[in-house]
Amino acid sequence: MQEEFPEFVEKLEKEGLVYTRVLGEGDDPSSPIGRGWQSTFLTKDKAVAEERAAKLGMKLEWTGDGVRTVMGPIPAVKWDESRGRKVWFNSMVAAYTGWKDARNDPVKAVTFGDGSPLPADVVAACGRVLEEECVAVPWRRGDILLLDNWAVLHSRRSFEPPRRILASLCK
């Protein structure tokens, strides 16, 4: 991306990204986002949800039947001390191409930190780079996989429900 779109990467490094999602009250298995605000924040109390969101650096804007979550601006490229290099550390392509349901427009799901839209052609090119670099891990029932998110981006392929994967993030 740095070689092909240096101005884009420079703006990402300068501005970061803002992620916006609209969540309903309950879970929606037909949505790629899936979870409603109550299961996202593990509460039915809006004040508790706001408190938990604030601890994550997220703002909540309540709507008639759910909440609009705004996260950022947050860095899209970070410095990895252990490897001594910059790393691509964002969900830009996933949000831009996949956060589509009755409440969410994926093109508006992620913007530059200044609120300006991402160029569709550059996001598509980034998606191609990610696909070229992708390593698929074949899963079998009972498997456990550990990933260093600073070394590799995690993702998933499209799937048909039902499917259940438990994940945990740790430092």
Image (spheres, rainbow, N blue to C red):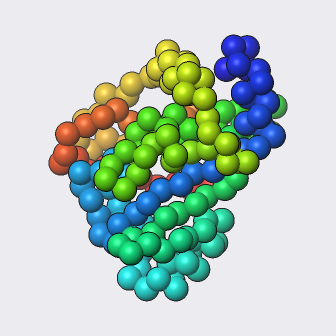
Q: Is residue 146 visible?
A: no
Q: Residue at x 19, y 45 (%)?
A: 161
Left or right of 37, for residue 50: right
Q: Residue at x 56, y 21 (%)?
A: 121
Query: Does 2 sit above or below residue 44?
Result: above
Left or right of 98, for residue 110: right
In the rendered image, residue 48, in percent from the top left (x then y), is placed at: 51, 83
Place residue 66 in its image quadrant: bottom left
Query: Does 42 sit above or below residue 132?
Result: below
In the rendered image, residue 150, in percent from the top left (x then y), is placed at: 64, 39
Q: Quadrant of the C terminus?
A: bottom right
Place residue 144 in its image quadrant: top left
In the rendered image, residue 96, in percent from the top left (x then y), is placed at: 49, 38
Q: Is residue 135 visible?
A: yes
Left or right of 30, for residue 46: right
Looking at the image, which is closer to me, 154 or 44? Answer: 44
Q: Residue at x 48, y 56 (%)?
A: 21
Query: Does 26 sit above or below residue 18?
Result: below
In the rendered image, residue 162, in percent from the top left (x then y), is placed at: 18, 48
Q: How many numbered discs, if any? A: 0
Q: Residue at x 61, y 58 (%)?
A: 71
Q: Quadrant of the N terminus?
A: top right
Looking at the image, which is closer to me, 90 or 24? Answer: 24
